[in-house]
Amino acid sequence: MGSRQIGAKRWGPIRLKLPISVAFDLEKFERALANVSQLVERGNRRSEFHGESLPAREFVVDPASLDVTEAYLR
């Protein structure tokens, strides 16, 4: 049997830039990851709808608000 892909398309790794203050605080880290996953999911849906080839792959986490932005927008 061949391998089969289940669920969303796999685009490869995601790069996440976050400050040490977020990386070493488990609650902040988990909230930041949840924010990233929401942004990636929205990007995947948008790229499939508009026929784009790849959603954003690099993100930056703001240490104060834990908001996530695409790295190329900063």
Image: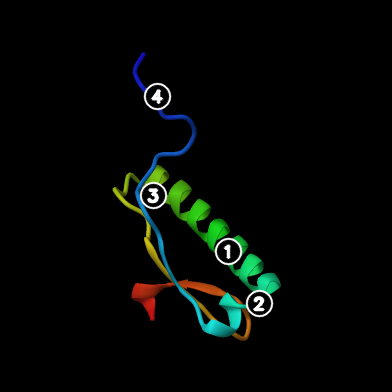
Above or below — where is 36 with respect to 21? Answer: above
Which quadrant is the C terminus positioned in? Answer: bottom left
Which of the two marks, 3 or 4, is nearer to us in this view? 4
Disc 2 target residue: 25
Disc 1 target residue: 33
- Across and down, in percent, residue 30 comes to 65, 65
Q: Amino acid at mark 1?
A: Leu
Q: CA distance from mark 1 to mark 3?
A: 21 Å
Q: Residue at x 51, y 54 (%)?
A: 42
Structural crowding at the residue carrying mark 3, measured as other residues with C-alpha within 10 Å and reported as few (<14), some (14–19) or many (≥20): some
Q: Are marks 4 and 2 in contact (CB under 8 Å)?
A: no
Q: Is residue 39 left or right of residue 2?
A: right
Q: CA distance from mark 1 to mark 2?
A: 12 Å
Q: Are marks 3 and 4 in contact (CB under 8 Å)?
A: no
Earlier-in-chain disc, 1 versus 3: 1
- Across and down, in percent, residue 24 comes to 61, 78
Q: Which residue lies most toward the front here?
A: 24
Q: Amino acid at mark 2?
A: Asp
Q: Is residue 43 left or right of residue 33?
A: left
Q: Name the element at disc 1.
A: helix
Q: Residue at x 37, y 76 (%)?
A: 73
Which of the two marks, 1 or 2, is nearer to us in this view? 2
- Across and down, in percent, residue 19 comes to 51, 82
Q: Are marks 1 and 2 in contact (CB under 8 Å)?
A: no
Earlier-in-chain disc, 1 versus 2: 2
Disc 3 target residue: 47
Which of the two marks, 1 or 3, is nearer to us in this view? 1
Q: Amino acid at mark 4?
A: Arg
Q: Residue at x 34, y 18 (%)?
A: 2
Above or below — where is 62 with respect to 47? Answer: below
Disc 4 target residue: 4
